[in-house]
Image (spheres, grey):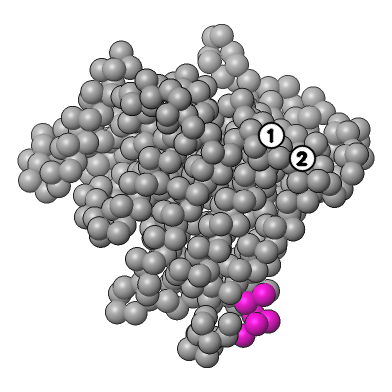
Amino acid sequence: MARFFEFDREGTGYRREIIGGITTFLAMAYIMFVNPSILSAAGMDQGAVFTATALASIVGCLLMAVVARYPVGIAPSMGLNAFFAYSVVLGMGVPWQTALVGVLFSGLIFVLITVLRLREMILDAIPVDLKMASACGIGLFIALIGFEDSGIVVNNKATLVTLGDLTLPATLLTVFGLFASIVLMLRRLPGAIFFGMVLTAVLGMITGVINPPQAIVGEVPSVAPVFGVAITRLFDAPGQVFTLNLLVVVLTFLFVEFFDTAGTLMAVATKAGLIEGNRIRRSRQALLADSSSVVASAVIGTSPTTSYIESTAGVASGARTGFASLVTAALFVLALFFSPLLSVVTSSVTAPALIIVGVLMVSSLGEIDWNRLEIAVPAFLTLITMPVTYSIANGIALGLVVYPVTMVVTGRGRELHPILYALFVVFVGYFAFLA
């Protein structure tokens, strides 16, 4: 095992890798409870999604461990699960079964372009400012969902949204959870978001806001309600699959998967010393593992997976190889038996996690060139459109429509890759279809 993972070359050992793998798991364990909560809003069985989340994470971590030998954890993406439930299913009216087909298609395309080495070309075509704006917009969108779920923000006929009743017990519990998570993060505790959820749930049970669970450990919920649905739907309802709506869904999944993975791998590789000559070692294998896990997540029955930036916590604790990812995968296996705890993970418990993740995703705001109006305008429209229209797809589409226009008007049209003009045509058609 030590020889396969090249412990001597990386200057590591079993103890460091095990501690690193445990740290990574604790930092991303919140997804086990947040993902079922989000996808259940789309009509999916919460217990089945709990199991699917764990299985997709296990497969993803194993792929990253064996194929790429990277200390990177993989699990369903926080941005894409919100897009899946709130934009695609609730917003566009696409059945969740059909949305899973979109996940499958995006994963297969992701694998294809990785194998053909087209990914770098497409990545280079999208301007970095729009990539950053997309990440920020997704962060704002996720935070808005957290504020709504908690009751901190509510509907208002005159102003669309307004401040909710902060004296309600469930809302007060969310406020506590938010401050508790912030304090733990400021103290640099590994797994701060997860432990913030634990503290919130415990306080909720003590105060009677949340009913205690009937058990701690229980049987693994059946994954049957969601497993393989993406494949059966492809043949049962082709009329719902091959539509412009689903094309937009696939493109959005693909877009976010692209840049989520690229940023995470760069961050982890830099921290773990896996960069040689300005190139990430085994980057193609890492991208292949990540994209293959998306295909697996679609078949298993959950929203797309991605490499988790929380893996940097494990690297900071000593992880340097894929053995740490094996440890993380093993802990997800154990987590499967704690499904009874789902009953205490209410919206008051998950909302602080959503808001905190939103904060982390907006951190790239400063990397956008706000001094150039031709860049600032499409970047701003990209990030603000996502929360105000409740759609990640709308934000990305509007940004890629406006950006070529502002660049051409300012005489910089020749700087754009032809792919951007093709996307301009696609998304103009998308808005025409919505109209």
> Which sits in the foreground, 397 or 175?
397
Question: In this view of the protein, can residue 386 be seen by the observer?
Answer: no
Identity, as a three-letter code, of the amino acid under mark 2:
Leu
Residue 281 image point, x, y percent: 37, 75
Q: Quadrant of the C terminus?
A: top left
Q: Residue at x 79, y 25 (%)?
A: 168
Answer whether residue 71 is magenta in the image. no
Residue identified by numbered label 2: 342
Left or right, 79 with reference to 252: right
Could you give the CA–CA distance between mark 2 and mark 1, rounded to whole angstroms? 9 Å
Residue 329 image point, x, y percent: 63, 62
Query: Which labelled disc corresponds to residue 353?
Result: none
Label 1 secondary element = helix
Q: Residue at x 19, y 41 (%)?
A: 420
Identity, as a three-letter code, of the amino acid under mark 1:
Gln
Residue identified by numbered label 1: 46
Query: Magenta residues, as a range?
Result: 13-18
Circles 2 and 1 in contact, beta carbons < 8 Å? yes
The relative height of residue 47 versus residue 19 in the rendered view (above or below) is above
Q: Residue at x 78, y 29 (%)?
A: 170
Left or right, 303 with reference to 153: left
Between marks 2 and 1 in the image, the one whose residue lies nearer the viewer? 1
The relative height of residue 346 versus residue 182 in the rendered view (above or below) is above
Residue 278 image point, x, y percent: 30, 74
Answer whether residue 15 is magenta in the image. yes
